[in-house]
């Protein structure tokens, strides 16, 4: 800009200043809370994802990381009716901070999931479904009817992609960019390919340790398709959000990844705190 244009622009800038924009919401879509199948076990005798995740531990990390809201669901149990009620209790206690998803096991709870999930959504206010494994028709039918996003950590990416293709009315969020701790980098590539192709398949960023694949996802997948998640509190929210910052996305893209995409999928009000 030359000096003259600059001087002509100045008064407009001085008088016509818009309201400073409200900070857009930061939402972590992958956090675990509550009691697991080994609740009460002596320290160091059971897997930490089967004992207890104190919701206050999550809130401490979220505060330190600048995260407004966390999507929470249970840690590992054999069945999830009680654990999902516990999640609903935490959401009632911290409604500004937590959004609850139900978790269900497609095998141990087969045949009961439709009834349970409907109650968890309609009576307890949970807003999505988390599972390990491949969702069954029972889960998918219910998710479609209730318009629930389904966050999945599948054993392999390909079978989930097939399910997503057959169920276009359900939004799927594929955790860990398709491979927890980048155990198989090829799965990251399969996830990126699928998210580009299928409008109802989204990718979530937690616990990716080979950073170049996160970078690649940010480059190759439309920014509307990538969601920040931490898998906290065991995978620390402060560390996981730092990886998103390191991507150095244009700020409008970063806002989508850090919260606006989640807000849209979850049909939240986007006015931030
Ligand atoms: Zn998880």
Image (spheres, helix red, strand yellow):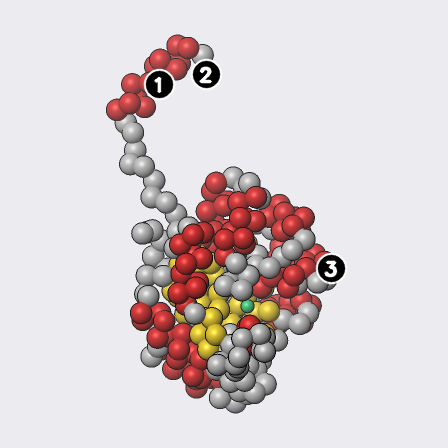
What residue does disc 3 label? 186
The mark nearer the N terminus, 1 or 2, is 2
What residue does disc 2 label? 1
Q: How packed is label 2: few (under 14 Cα within 10 Å), some, or many (20 or more)? A: few
Decide if ligand 1 comes within 8 Å of the CB at mark 3.
Answer: no
Q: How packed is label 3: few (under 14 Cα within 10 Å), some, or many (20 or more)? A: some
Under circle 3, the secondary element is helix
Residue 167 vs residue 85: left or right? Answer: right
- Between tags 2 and 3, which lies in front? 3
Q: CA distance from mark 3 to mark 1?
A: 52 Å
What residue does disc 1 label? 9
The mark nearer the N terminus, 3 or 1, is 1
Q: Position of residue 243 (x, y in %)?
A: 56, 49
Near-viewer residue (266 or 167):
266
Q: What residue do we see at 29% from left, 29% from top?
A: 17
Q: What residue do we see at 45% from left, 57% from top?
A: 61
Q: Which quadrant of the view contains residue 188?
A: bottom right
Single out the residue that lies furthest toward the top.
4
Could you tell me if residue 16 is visible in this image? yes
Q: Are marks 1 and 2 in contact (CB under 8 Å)?
A: yes
* Total numbered labels: 3
Above or below, 93 relative to 79: above
Q: What residue do we see at 63% from left, 47% from top?
A: 215
Single out the residue that lies furthest toward the left.
15
Q: Position of residue 203 (x, y in %)?
A: 57, 59
Q: Position of residue 132 (x, y in %)?
A: 59, 74
The mark nearer the N terminus, 2 or 3, is 2
């Amino acid at each position: 800009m030359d000096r003259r244009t600059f001087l002509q622009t100045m008064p407009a800038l001085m008088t016509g200043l818009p309201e400073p924009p409200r900070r857009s919401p930061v939402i972590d879509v992958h956090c675990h809370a509550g009691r697991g199948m080994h609740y009460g076990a002596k320290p160091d005798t059971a897997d930490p994802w089967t004992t207890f995740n104190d919701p206050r531990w999550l809130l401490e990390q979220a505060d330190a990381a600048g995260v407004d809201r966390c999507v929470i669901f249970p840690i590992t149990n054999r069945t999830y009716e009680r654990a999902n009620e516990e999640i609903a209790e935490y959401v009632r206690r911290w409604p500004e901070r937590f959004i609850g998803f139900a978790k269900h096991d497609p095998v141990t709870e087969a045949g009961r999931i439709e009834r349970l999930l409907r109650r968890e959504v309609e009576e307890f206010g949970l807003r999505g479904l988390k599972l390990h494994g491949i969702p069954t028709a029972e889960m998918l039918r219910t998710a479609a009817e209730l318009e629930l996003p389904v966050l999945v950590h599948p054993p392999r990416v390909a079978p989930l992609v097939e399910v997503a293709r057959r169920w276009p009315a359900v939004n799927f969020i594929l955790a860990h960019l398709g491979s927890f701790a980048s155990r198989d980098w090829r799965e990251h590539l399969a996830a990126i390919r699928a998210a580009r192709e299928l409008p109802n398949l989204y990718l979530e960023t937690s616990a990716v340790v080979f950073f170049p694949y996160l970078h690649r996802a940010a480059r190759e997948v439309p920014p509307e398709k990538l969601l920040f998640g931490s898998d906290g509190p065991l995978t620390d929210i402060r560390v996981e959000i730092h990886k998103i910052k390191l991507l150095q996305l244009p700020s409008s893209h970063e806002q989508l990844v850090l919260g606006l995409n989640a807000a849209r999928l979850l049909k939240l009000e986007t006015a931030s705190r």
